[in-house]
Amino acid sequence: LDMRNRSDNSARSCRFAAPDILKGQVGSPTPMDAAVKKDEPASRIGVRSTVLICVGVGWTWYTMTTPGDRAQERPFAPIYALEDLRHFDGNGPDGTILIGVLGRVFNVTSGTEFYAKGQGYSVFAGHDCTHAFAIASTKAKHLDLDLDDLPHKKLDHLNSTYWETYVAKYPIIGRLTNTPYDPSRYDHLAGPYAEIRVSAGAHPRRARAGKRQSRCPVTRAARAIGSTLANLIPRALAPPSWAASS
């Protein structure tokens, strides 16, 4: 009798459990269904996510690397003497215009409307202009001079002109030697004279071979995106802000 009661209870339990099991199989989502639904949004945003990741990698590389890191990828600046600058006053076959400031050689050819022959600032072409910029002069007699006895106020003005006008707008393509002053004395203004490198994107006439480019596709893509973003910033072509009133 005991065994028969147990059999009846087991049969009754099976009858009540069966509808619940069938209900779970037919009406409720299975783990596989949940996985499929979870993957659907990812497939829809896959392309957009890839683009955002690429842009993010490029921007991170460009902004997070220090100026020193980026400088290591540029060649050291080739050497120019004062006599070399004389040949780049805009009257040569290719019209190149170079000037010297704090031992750096700037290519200002893109500003020919200011520095070319016959223009208002052609006096600077082919010369070291450091002293003239310090005293805000456009006179030829103030070119290729030393910086002795200049007050701190004049050096501050020189520093502003160097960074805000020339570094911001024109490429450094060389290092000027035999200047009438010792450029290394002014490293606190312009940075280490002994470690001058060409500006990013500049094409010096006598630059040394650059560092071998990485073959890693991720690194190359990041650099390409960073350079593209940097080139979107327009470069103004203007003479020194004080020159118009000199």
Image: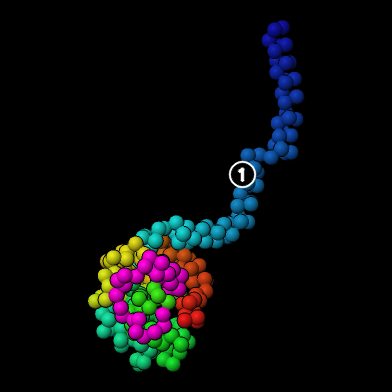
Question: Is 180 displayed left or right of 164 in the figure?
Answer: left
The residue depicted at 64 percent of the width and 52 percent of the height is: 41
Q: Work out whether residue 37 or residue 156 is closer to the camera in this orientation and state it.
A: 156
Answer whether residue 142 is magenta in the image: yes
The residue depicted at 48 percent of the width and 77 percent of the height is: 242
Task: Give the answer, above or below, for where 135 lies relative to 19.
Answer: below
Task: Give the answer, above or below, for where 188 lies relative to 77.
Answer: above
| Residue 110 x/y as whole percent | 44, 82
Position of the N terminus, as image quadrant, is top right
Q: Residue furthest top?
A: 1
The residue depicted at 59 percent of the width and 59 percent of the height is: 48
Q: Amino acid at mark 1?
A: Ala
- Which span is picked out in magenta? 137-166
Q: Work out whether residue 172 or residue 82 is closer to the camera in this orientation and state it.
A: 82
Q: Is residue 71 visible?
A: no
| Residue 61 x/y as whole percent | 44, 59
Q: What residue did someone put label 1 on?
A: 35
Q: Work out whether residue 43 or residue 168 is closer to the camera in this orientation and state it.
A: 168
